[in-house]
Amino acid sequence: MNSSESLTPDANGQPGPPAVARVQAALGSLVASERRVAEVVLANPRAIIGWTASELASKARTSATTVIRFAKNSGFSGYQDLAIALALSESPTQPSEDLAATDTAAATLRKVGARAAAAVGGMAEAVDPDAFTNAVQLIAAANHTLCLGAALSAPAALDFAYRLNHLGLAADAPADSQVQHIRAFQLRPRDVCIVFLHGGKYPPVVEAARAAKYAGAIVVGVTAFRGTPLAELADIPLILGARTVHSGLAAWESRLASLALVDALTAAVAHLNPAQSDRSVSHIQDLIEQDLL
């Protein structure tokens, strides 16, 4: 089975993201009872294939009606469509092992490594390739790119600004929320504001993104969930997906997915102008060798 065969059609009959990625992207917009269903599905997607809606409802401590509503709100026509989509997945997600206080240090290392690998791999499936391509082209052509983030999402913003400067492109990533807002208002058309925000809701950063859009810049929103304030505001939402909306390890995994996305964006931008990128990287390497950096 090739990769295109593992994708279920969207509402327009076109291939869409894999089933697990679609559930992950919907988490942020689900009500609590639907979210419990989603978390049961994400914990062991292969098991769902053999369950009825009532059996899944029992596992999630809710009703079969809620299970069906969850499936529809996650982008499927109903529960059967969800089950079929999971069955057709070429590389189904393996059940994740939760961390436990009784774990040895070695077991913790193994579990965190497995969850990190799943988060990075899931990102590549969840992000819409057309949206990604559009973002790359706009960033490569931008006069300036403002990179914003907060809390665990902030390192991705800082890393991307550094990477763009490394390629010879103008970018900055202010950490202070007031400075973020000021810089956003200073943007102009042909500038890009890329925002990294796991939950897509933190008001100071969302308002800075709104200021950037008001100033005429293109807003690229990198977040775990569709339907969040950032995803709705962004001209180009890049939805990473996540196992849960709760804080803790899930948020750490989202940070790893964001950093992997930064790597992909950087490489794709460099490929659009390899001569400039090579020239800038070579100059920085010369400075490093002269102990100037």
Image: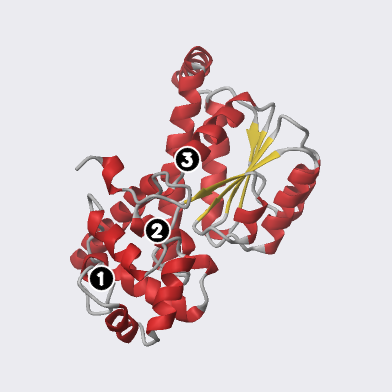
**Compared to 195, does 169 lie above or below?**
above
Q: Which residue is mark 3?
A: 262
Q: Can residue 182 be seen from the camera position used here?
A: yes
Residue in the foreground of this view, choosing between 181 and 245: 245
Q: Residue at x 51, y 71 (%)?
A: 30
Mark closest to the chain's N terminus, 1 or 2 = 1
Which quadrant of the figure contains the N terminus? Answer: top left
Classify mark 3: helix, strand or loop: helix
Three-letter amino acid code of the residue under disc 3: Val
The tag earlier along the polypeptide, 3 or 2, is: 2
Q: Earlier in the sequence, mark 1 or mark 3?
A: 1
Looking at numbered disc 2 in the image, what kind of residue is underneath it? Glu
Q: Residue at x 23, y 51 (%)?
A: 91
Q: Quadrant of residue 68?
A: bottom left
Q: Determine the secondary structure under disc 1.
A: helix
**Residue at (72% x, 49% y) in the render:** 180
Q: Is the residue marked by circle 2 packed among few (<14), some (14-19), or many (20+) residues within 10 Å?
A: many
Instruction: Report which residue position mark 1 lands on.
Output: 48
Q: Is residue 108 above or below residue 211?
A: below
Q: Nearer the viewer, residue 185 or 93?
A: 93
Mark 2 — residue? 253
